[in-house]
Amino acid sequence: MKEYNLKTEPLQFIEIRELKVSREINEHGTAVISGYIADKDEEIYIKQLTGDVWEKIEEVGKDGEAQILFWGIVTGFSVESMKDQKRMTLEITTGTCFMDLKPHFRTFQDSTVTYEKIFEQITGTYENPGLIKTRPLTDTTGKLVLQHRESDWEFLKRIAARFHSFLVPSTRTCGVKYFYDLPEGERYEFPDSIKYTVKKDLGGYRRKRNQGLQEMQEGACLEYILQSREDYQIGDQMIVNGLQLFVWKMDSRYERGEMLHTCHLKSRSGMDFPETFQEDRSGCSFQAEVLQVKEDKVMVKVLKDENQEQNINLWYPYSTVYSTPDGTGWYCMPEIGDVVRLHIPEQREEEAYVVSSVHLDTESPDRKNPEYKIMKNKYQKEVRFTPESIVITNNQGTKIELNDAKGVQIVSQHDIVIKAKDDLTISSETGSLIAAGTASVNLKQKTTSIDLDQGISFTGGELKVQ
């Protein structure tokens, strides 16, 4: 039996009656401690606990040596008055819980940014942060990475799972500190004559295989669970029956004056996580502004993106009403500055494409009559379909109108040129054919012509009048 006492600060106990500590990969570390406090401290502690309190729990040996057992932020407390004693209970969580409080919406659209930079950018937004990488994160994204209504903790866990990895909160330091992948722990001998249990989780093994971990071996689902008075840390390793196993979970409790620990060990491959996806974002669309247009692709800035300072360099396909690989179809690209939608059709955000614009509030008279169908570009070139007409116009005095009541009208501020390789026929079945010109009227065929210019002039080899 180890001889030591438990010590806490800044909130101190006269006597500690209960302590439970839980540590596990991908989960915030937690501790619940309960014991008696001095009457005079009750009001002081309650006042302190209205703000952030980082509580440290230490094991102090008989020679005075101290070792941190747990250090975290107080996330809940109660003070119970019983007879002449005050019993206080504290719920303590690792600082990583601050990363799990608020959902965020960010896009990462710089194809050259590394996953390491994403981790550092997000971690750096917290007070007293720390990120220790025990595995490289140097791959560039090369594609869209989307954080949609996820807390930073959920998002980074999902990103880690792309590499079948995980996060491990630091349980012995103050601040928002954690490890990417398994910490480098100590090597220990497997204790002789110790109580342990061996489990084989075949259901979990099959689920992981079906979710993409095809190379996982059945032996990876073996787990050793042992009871110990030794406080192992996540990442510590042992050789058990020729297998290299690592601590991935620890449950500790204070019982009859000593700490007892339940230690869970797995092979490193047994800790691999399959890639995970956000099911609820499939089919989502986000308003975005067009930054650049190239061929049949666009570059966009998402309007409510928290990551506005990034270097955007990703191109997205632009959805159209009809398109084929040979170029047949509808080609009508948006303009720079247009508001469009970035659409996520399935689970993977890298499959995103941009879809059509949404009508915003405007005073334009073109959008007052739903019976009018109008196509207009930023240069005011327009095709308008109304119930009684089709109008093609440049809105600068030139137009062609096909009107049910008035027929066809061609109006131009400049020349009108009609050319035909073969015959050109102009006829009127019941009315007249009128050719009028303010300056002159000229009819010409090769060397023969008739000019109407203040008089009538005939030019040609032969003139016949009947």
Image (spheres, rainbow, N blue to C red):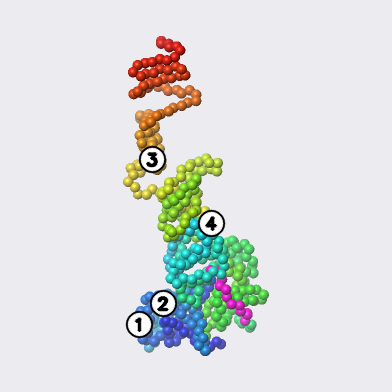
Q: Nearer the viewer, mark 3 or mark 2?
A: 3
**Residue underneath mark 3:** 380
**Residue underneath mark 4:** 142
Choose top left, top right, bottom left or bottom right for residue 212.
bottom right
Which residue sits at x=45%, y=19%? 445
Instruction: Name the residue type under label 1.
Output: Glu
**Residue underneath mark 2:** 53
Q: Which of marks 4 and 2 is in front?
A: 4
Residue 28 in the image, given as x and y percentages of width and height: 49, 72
- Pick whichever of labels 3 and 2 is earlier in the sequence: 2
Instruction: Name the residue type under label 2.
Output: Val
* Helix, strand or loop under label 3: loop
Choose top left, top right, bottom left or bottom right for residue 434.
top left
Choose top left, top right, bottom left or bottom right for residue 286.
bottom left
Q: Which of marks 2 and 1 is in front?
A: 2
Task: Give the quadrant of the C terminus.
Answer: top left
For label 2, the crowd category at 10 Å Cα-Cα, with few meaning under 14, some 14 to 19 and many 20 or more, is: some
Question: How many labels, in total?
Answer: 4
Residue 63 in the image, given as x and y percentages of width and height: 52, 89
